[in-house]
Image: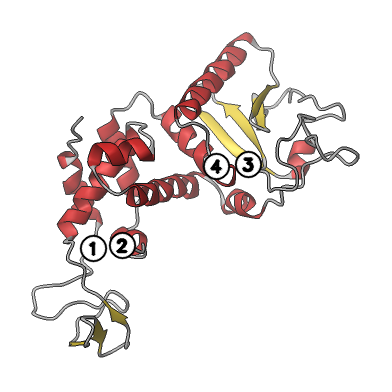
Amino acid sequence: MIINADSLLPHLKEKVRPTQSDASRHLLCPHCGIRTKLNTLGDGRRKCTLCGKKFRIHKVTEGNKLQQCAEILLCFCLDFSAHRAAQITYHRYRLVALYYDHFRRLLTETHLSPQKLQLLSEHTGDIHMLHDRFRCRWCKSKRRSVGKEQPPVFGVRLASSGGVTIDPLNDDEVALHFDAFGSAKEALGSDKGYAGFICCSKFHRTTNVEGVKDSAEKLWSWIRERVSARHGIWKRNTGFYLKELEWKYNNRSIDPDLQAQNIISFMPADFLTAWVEKEVP
């Protein structure tokens, strides 16, 4: 299989800002971003005369990096796993996985409030029952790993337009929807009600309305199909994976090239230096 991502290169070139060199004979320091004279050290590194930082000038050109990013981004939108994308594009798996992590985090930060985003990183994982630490505090499901961090409960909302929102919930929000017997209660009389909750790798449906019920089951089947194709997901990154699946589900009718262009619009201008150059070869 050949991945042709040439259509994405103009969009990436418009996004990226020059950080390596300009029209003069001097290079731009990647740390301070100022054009100045660089001293050459004995080990081949360069030293900025202004900030004093030492660095190496990579032989990989900016054009090659943009080509790599475009191909990996297209594989991401085609829903290939990082391992499969590395096989198709012949890029290092470590580089592909690094880009995939940044794409997921980018989609999460774009579609989550700072409070919800903080919940993903600060959840303590204390969800076991008071008198039975082998069962979940909320859904009473048996836990496979005791004593390890667990992701928070995620609420699933279905919009009338067909869109879906999957957000992490704090303990106070979860307590409003789960009763003492571990069943999820339906939130009635409010458009803020949840169609279901994702807890302990299970989907707990909370609505009996036929249209909403069918949409919820269709969504969960769609998620399970993609998670199974990847042989599961990391628990510590559950929120980022779910936000990725949420975005892909809401944009599933859009061509992968257009999906990639939408992601490019979210990317920072200095992604080449902020994302890639920090990777250790």
Tell me if residue 224 comes above or below residue 265 in the rendering.
above
Relative side of 261 to 102, left or right = left
Report the residue marked by disc 1: 17
For label 1, the SS is: loop
Quadrant in the picture for residue 5: top left
* CA distance for labels 1 and 4: 33 Å
Report the residue marked by disc 3: 168
* CA distance for labels 4 and 2: 28 Å
Residue 260 visible in the shown view: no
Residue 54 image offset from top left, x and y in percent:
30, 82
Residue 262 image offset from top left, x and y in percent:
32, 41
Upstream in the sequence, badge 2 or badge 1?
Answer: 1
Relative side of 218 to 73, left or right = right
| Tag of residue 270 | 2
Q: Would you say the residues marked 2 and 1 are in contact, meaning their CB atoms lie under 8 Å apart?
A: yes
Tell me if residue 274 comes above or below residue 52 in the rendering.
above
Residue drawn where x is 81% and y is 27% of the image: 182
Residue drawn where x is 22% and y is 55% of the image: 65
Q: Would you say the residues marked 3 and 1 are in contact, meaning their CB atoms lie under 8 Å apart?
A: no
| Tag of residue 234 | 4
